[in-house]
Image (tube, coloured by chain):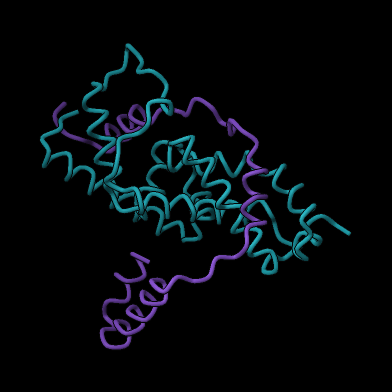
Chain colours: A purple, B cyan
């Protein structure tokens, strides 16, 4: 068998990605989440505003790149 | 007041109760895509953080589980986009190789690496369909796309994978 048929690929992928060993988190995630919820909101960084500005400019002048831009954002 | 209504109103205790009820499901959905338990834990926290931030948009007459699943899958796909082409899978994620496996170990590694190089929008449906063997209709509902879009993405994923394997000279 020298070709990757659909069935060969399916079988090989199942072998390459076996079922995970554990299906539950190892630790209680609530304390981590609670800490994050209680953290003060971070101000938006200047770099984020710069990305928004550049993206808006690109969309305005080159609307054809919208799909590429949305994919990467 | 009903739990979901309280959550929609921003009640933290209601949210914790929902977290306790659904964290296992959310973790497993994410794990199905990212195949990395440590990352799946972090992404579970990220998912519930996003869920809480969006509590006002949740409709209490809807299904919390379906809503959480949609957000979890989006978080997992974002992770795949960020980590695509990065590192091989961590060792703890996989069960030891079966001695009677017909697929050689090196082939599996190269196949897994090639699969991880696929665009995230193809990886997620392909993983859920080909590895997890979920029905197309369920994948479509989970990803928020049509069933035909699921089929198209899986078809393209397999085609791309086949092309990558041929270029690398990887034989079954």
User: What residue occupies the far right of the structure in this picture?
Assistant: B1
Judge from the rendering whether residue B9 lies leftward or rightward of residue B35; answer left or right: right
- Residue B123, given in percent of the width and then of the height, sits at 36, 48
Judge from the rendering whether residue B78 lies leftward or rightward of residue B48; answer left or right: left
What residue lies at 73% left-to-right and 49% top-to-bottom? B18
Residue B91's quadrant in the figure? Answer: top left
What residue lies at 43% left-to-right and 29% top-to-bottom? B93
Judge from the rendering whether residue B48 lies leftward or rightward of residue A11; answer left or right: right
Viewer-proximal residue, A58 or A3?
A: A58
- Residue B124, given in percent of the width and then of the height, sits at 41, 48
Residue B102's quadrant in the figure? Answer: top left
- Residue A23, given in percent of the width and then of the height, sits at 56, 31
- Residue A49, given in percent of the width and then of the height, sits at 41, 77
The mark tally for this picture is 0
| Figure quadrant of the C terminus of chain B | top left
Position of residue A54 relative to residue B169, above or below, is below
User: What residue occupies the far bottom of the structure in this picture?
Assistant: A61
Residue B86's quadrant in the figure? Answer: top left
| Figure quadrant of the N terminus of chain B | bottom right
Judge from the rendering whether residue A54 lies leftward or rightward of residue A33; answer left or right: left
Viewer-proximal residue, B101 or A72?
A: A72
Viewer-proximal residue, A7 or B129?
A: B129
Position of residue B165 relative to residue B100, above or below, is below
């Amino acid at each position: 068998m020298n070709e990757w048929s659909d069935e060969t690929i399916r079988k090989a992928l199942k072998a390459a990605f076996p079922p995970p060993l554990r299906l539950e988190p190892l630790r209680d995630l609530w304390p981590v989440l609670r800490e994050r919820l209680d953290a003060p909101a971070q101000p938006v960084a200047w770099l984020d505003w710069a990305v928004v500005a550049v993206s808006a400019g690109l969309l305005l002048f080159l609307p054809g790149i919208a799909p590429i831009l949305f994919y990467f954002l | 007041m009903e739990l979901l209504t309280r959550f929609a109103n921003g009640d933290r205790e209601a949210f914790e109760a929902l977290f306790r009820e659904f964290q296992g499901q959310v973790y497993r959905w994410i794990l199905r895509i990212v195949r990395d338990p440590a990352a799946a834990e972090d992404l579970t926290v990220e998912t519930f953080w996003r869920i809480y931030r969006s509590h006002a948009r949740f409709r209490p007459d809807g299904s919390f589980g379906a809503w959480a699943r949609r957000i979890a899958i989006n978080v997992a796909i974002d992770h795949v986009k960020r980590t695509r082409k990065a590192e091989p899978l961590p060792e703890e994620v996989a069960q030891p190789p079966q001695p009677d496996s017909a697929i050689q170990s090196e082939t599996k590694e190269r196949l897994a690496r090639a699969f991880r190089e696929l665009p995230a929008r193809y990886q997620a449906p392909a993983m859920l369909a080909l590895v997890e063997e979920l029905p197309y209709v369920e994948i479509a509902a989970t990803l928020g796309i049509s069933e035909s879009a699921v089929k198209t993405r899986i078809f393209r994923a397999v085609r791309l994978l086949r092309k990558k394997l041929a270029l690398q000279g990887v034989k079954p």
